[in-house]
Amino acid sequence: MKKILILAGGYSKEKEISIQTAKSVLYELNKDKKCILKVVNPDGQFIKILRKFKPNVVLNLLHGRYGEDGYIQAILESEKVKYTHSGVLSSSLAIDKELSKKIYIKNKILTPKFLKYSFKYSLNKKKILKKLKNKLGFPLIIKPLNEGSSVNVFICNKKNVFRNINRLKEYGEILFEKYIPGREIQVAILSGKVLGAIELKPKRKFYDYQAKYNPKAKTEHLIPVNISKSQYNEVTKIAQKAHRLLKCRGVSRSDFRFFEDKFYLLETNTQPGMTSLSLVPEIAKFNNITFKNLIRKILKDASINK
């Protein structure tokens, strides 16, 4: 009997998505009578429960900070237990939007221009406005440096940029990013191989948190993506390259904007959602991989010290 400890919940703003993911995964795994399952929220009792349960593998379904930033991975490494998805270094690099962008640029992967801002410096509105206008132009994107699921991501113009900046003070550091219009295409990589791609047509301004997880937002999912074979090969190769450069393991999902025949890589997610509205299961299903088999493949890739 294989003992699987499932990590869900956590402390990030994506806690509810993690719980939804766990429910979807648990429903499938409960069908397998060869597994002993235990769902745990990583609170103060987590390590005690982990040592007592002695799992063969930890299925990490946490999202956001403390769950996919290397924090929980470091704990699991210290306990010498196999766990799913990317390791400590990969997780910390991918969730840090500045560091991952620097890796993309160094390796000739096109990504939107950006500027980092720290709240430890005084907010000189005139200087910041001038710098943003000259370096990035308006509209632009502002986002936390290390959040996922498009939490607290805003499209800004000159009139509302400072109002939105003030909404992100809790993060300490934020990223300004050049706004790239165009089509939203996302690519999933599984065990280093291309799983597939999907295009999103949100009813909202962009594929934000509500567009991702609120059924009423009615985001249109298009699969297969209506691009040429050479364009498909190009975008999937970029996603595969990003997966490799960031040393990802298991499944990753890279988010792109396709504008004027160019693919701009926005970010790579090391622990994509696995809810009923999530993209990776949908891409897998289109490619004849059931949700259950997708979970099995992710579990099979579990490891330590990677």
Image (tube, rainbow, N blue to C red):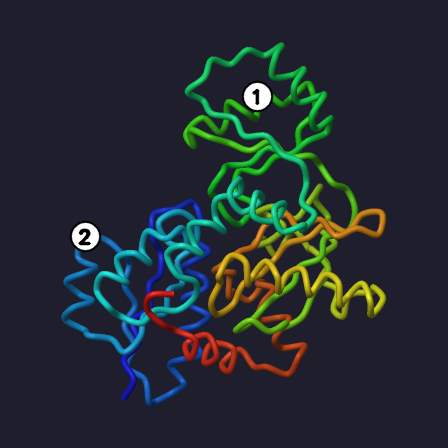
Tell me, for residue 163, which label it has, or none.
1
Left or right, residue 88 beside residue 93? left
Q: Amino acid at mark 2?
A: Gly
Q: Position of residue 118 (x, y in %)?
A: 47, 25
Towards the viewer: 218 or 201: 201
Residue 197: name its quadrant.
bottom right
Q: Amino acid at mark 1?
A: Arg
Q: Residues within 10 Å of mark 2 (few under 14, many from 20)?
A: few
Towards the viewer: 99 or 285: 99
Left or right, residue 249 beside residue 55? right
Q: Position of residue 79 (x, y in %)?
A: 21, 64
Name the residue carrying label 2. Answer: 44
User: Which residue shows up at 37% across the image and 56% down it?
Assistant: 88
Residue 299 sits above or below residue 163 on the image: below
Towards the viewer: 215 or 275: 275
Q: Secondary structure at mark 1?
A: helix
Towards the viewer: 147 or 191: 191
Q: Position of residue 304 (x, y in %)?
A: 32, 69
Left or right, residue 304 beside residue 264? left
The quadrant of the image that shows the N terminus is: bottom left
Among numbered discs 1 and 2, the one appearing first in the sequence = 2
